[in-house]
Image (tube, rainbow, N blue to C red):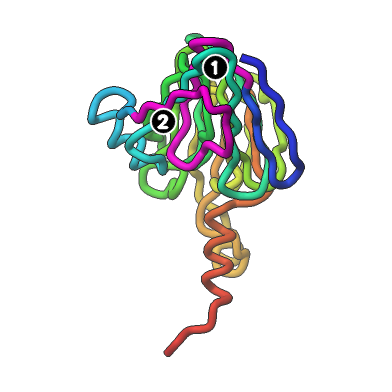
Amino acid sequence: MRYEITGENAPVVICHLEDGESMITQGGGMAWMSPNMDMRTDGGGSLGKALGRMFSGERIFQNIYTAKGEGMIAFAPSFPGQIIALDVTPEQPIVLQKRAFLASESGVQLSTYLQKKGMVGFFGGEGFIMQKVTGQGKVFIEVDGSAVTYELGEGEQLVVDTGTLAAMDGTCSMDVVAVKGAKNILFGGEGLFNTVITGPGKVVLQTISFTNLVNAIAASIPSSN
């Protein structure tokens, strides 16, 4: 599979496939394709895995596109930002935020990742239930806004708003800590908790939080009462 990512704040990834090669995406991910691409809708494994994807922000069913001869298929995100290509190996799974998965090669599996460490399960918000990609192959993720990448060393930490985390290596861990100081909590405007990511591994952050954007738009809409 060869690919090219083009476009600026409204990007698309165009994949060129050899005969028999397949790509997996969620419903609505396909933007255009050559007429010799065969589509098959699949639950992607057991019912438990399908329901898990639903709780992690994806659809229950996945679409599998297979080239009959040399083919081409393009995938576009649902929100302005960037498309990032990441390599998944059996030794290096990747954890994604909700909505981040766009498409992947057929050797990659998507499942639910539950954060259980510390207070994450109680206060992690959108970071509590995430996505995990395993297997072997290329995965394309959609990043809201622009992507900023950090490579954390062993034990090195980064404090982020949960909504800014797009992806992290499976070797990283995530925890939630309370904001210190009553004045900071009451007037800081950053909420009660921060998310702390601990290395080693790569962390991909996004400059726009989709959830925060939705909340800001909702708050600006005049009430009908």
Q: Nearer the viewer, residue 200 or 99?
A: 99
Q: Is residue 107 above or below residue 29?
A: above
User: Which quadrant, please, contains the C terminus?
Assistant: bottom left
Q: Is residue 174 above or below residue 212?
A: above
User: Which quadrant, please, contains the N terminus?
Assistant: top right
Q: Nearer the viewer, residue 125 or 180?
A: 125
- Dot 1 corresponds to which residue? 88
Asked if the magenta segment contains residue 28, the reply would be yes
- Dot 2 corresponds to which residue? 63
Q: Is residue 138 above or below residue 196?
A: above
- Amino acid bearing label 1: Val
Residue 49 in the image: state x and y as whole percent: 30, 29
Residue 188 in the image: state x and y as whole percent: 62, 64
Residue 16 in the image: state x and y as whole percent: 63, 19
Counting the numbered discs, the total is 2
Tell me, yes or no, whether the two marked residues, 1 and 2, touch with CB atoms within 8 Å.
no
Structural distance between the alpha carbons of marks 1 and 2: 20 Å
Segment tinted magenta in the rendering: 16-41
Residue furthest to the right: 8
Asked if the magenta segment contains residue 83, the reply would be no
- Amino acid bearing label 2: Asn
Which residue is located at x 46 percent, y 14 percent? 107
Residue furthest to the left: 47
Which residue is located at x 34 percent, y 42 percent? 55
Q: Is residue 156 above or below residue 82?
A: above
Q: Nearer the viewer, residue 79 or 56?
A: 79
Earlier along the polypeptide chain: callout 1 or callout 2? 2
Q: Please, what secondary structure does the residue beneath circle 2 have?
A: strand
